[in-house]
Every structure is written in C-alpha cells, then in structure tokens.
Amino acid sequence: MSQEQSYTRWTRDQMAARVAQDIPDGAVVNLGIGLPTAVANHLSADKEVVLHSENGVIGMGPAPKEGEEDFDLINAGKQPVTLLPGGCFFHHADSFAMMRGGHLDVCVLGAFQVSASGDLANWHTGAPDAIPAVGGAMDLAIGAKKTYVMMEYLTKKGEAKLTPTCTYPITGIACVSRLYTDLAVIDLVNGEARVLDLAPGLTFEALQAMTPGVTLVQA
C-alpha cells in the first residue's frame, strides 16, 4: 500500500470545523478569502462569535441558503453572507481601523507558505503571470491578537507549504500562531512546529518526511 493510500486527508469542511472548535466564546474574528470563509458554517450555536469582514461588515452569520442570497450584502471575497441580529455594515476606513487597532481576537487566513518561525506568505507567488492580491492580509496578520492559517499541507507538486523560510513575498513576520491543514494541526511557538493533531492513519514520522528542513515536535 502506498503512503498516499495509508491515510485519509481531512476535507475542507473538516478543516473548517476544526478551526471553529478552537475559536473561543466571545471572540471577534475575521475569516479571510477562500478556505477560511467555511468556518462560519461550523460555529457552535452555544458560542457567541462576532464575525468581521474588512469591507465593512460585522456580525455575520453562516452562508445564506441557495436562492436567499442578497448580493448587496457580501464579504471581502464578494460572497453573499447573512447578518445576525445586531450586525451592521460601515465605512471601509473604520473597518481597517478595527484591524490595525488590535480589536480582532483572531483572524483566519489562507496561505501559499508559512515558515516554521511563523512568517506568512499569502498574497503573491512571485510568478510573472500571477495576479498579486494583498487586500487586507497584511493589516489582519499583524493587527489580530492571533493569526491562524488554513491551507493544504502540500503543493500540487507535493512540496510542503510549511518551510524553513518563505521563498514567496512576505505578508507578515512571525505572525502565525497555528496551522490548520488537511494533514495536521500545528502550533508555531518560539520557532518550534508542534504537531497537535494528525489526519487519520498519518504517522508523525510520515509527516516529518514530507517536511524537509523543518524539525517537527510532537506536542
């Protein structure tokens, strides 16, 4: 049996549910474009989590049901959202003031690469034909009290996105505190990559073999 067949990757919904599980009651949270937006659909009803979007929305709920979308009410990724009682929308500048002023407890972002020391690269691959899309990522990564990253562990070429150093343009230095991937959940603390959870059937040794240049630690 090949290594690929010996374990089961977490789905994107399972990754989102794992992130939602770790968001504390009462937190103000920004969910970045892409994978992180699914976290809203997995937040427990017994938690009060206030969702913020940098285009100027706060108090969002889960994604709307098909046919009930209001395209005048969207998040930063131009996806329709719902608004919970007490939610509101406001000026873009006020939204960025919240981000830069340290008023977000958690932001959840996607990434192209994350270094073992917590550096984040998520806005440009440096490829000549790539379209740079920094948006509010730099403000979020540095302004939030905790920055979580959701990403697939390997590139399409099978290379680890958790690297000794980032080779893509940097979004933020030493800002990422936890990685949620399809293979593992990893804390980045004081330069250490501590493996908290592994996908079903995946061994610590196999994950280490996929991650050259980074010494993983079992939490």
Image: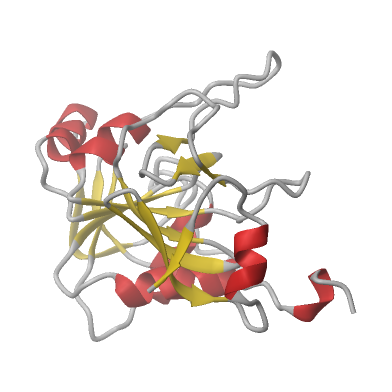
Q: Is residue 58 above or below residue 131?
A: below
Q: Is residue 165 above or below residue 59?
A: above
Q: Position of residue 212 (x, y in %)?
A: 62, 48
Q: Position of residue 16 (x, y in %)?
A: 48, 68
Q: Position of residue 167 (x, y in %)?
A: 55, 27
- Residue 55 relative to residue 99: left or right: right
Residue 62: quarter of image? bottom left
- Give me the residue at 32% from left, 30% from top: 138
- Give me the residue at 63% from left, 77% from top: 203
- Give me the residue at 71% from left, 78% from top: 8
Relative depth, front residue between 118 and 93: 118
Relative depth, front residue between 123 and 45: 123
Residue 98: quarter of image? top left
Residue 218: quarter of image? bottom left
Q: Position of residue 188 (x, y in %)?
A: 35, 55
- Residue 153 relative to residue 195: left or right: right
Task: Pick out the residue farthest to the top.
Answer: 128
From where the camera sits, is residue 124 visible?
yes
From where the camera sits, is residue 63 visible?
no
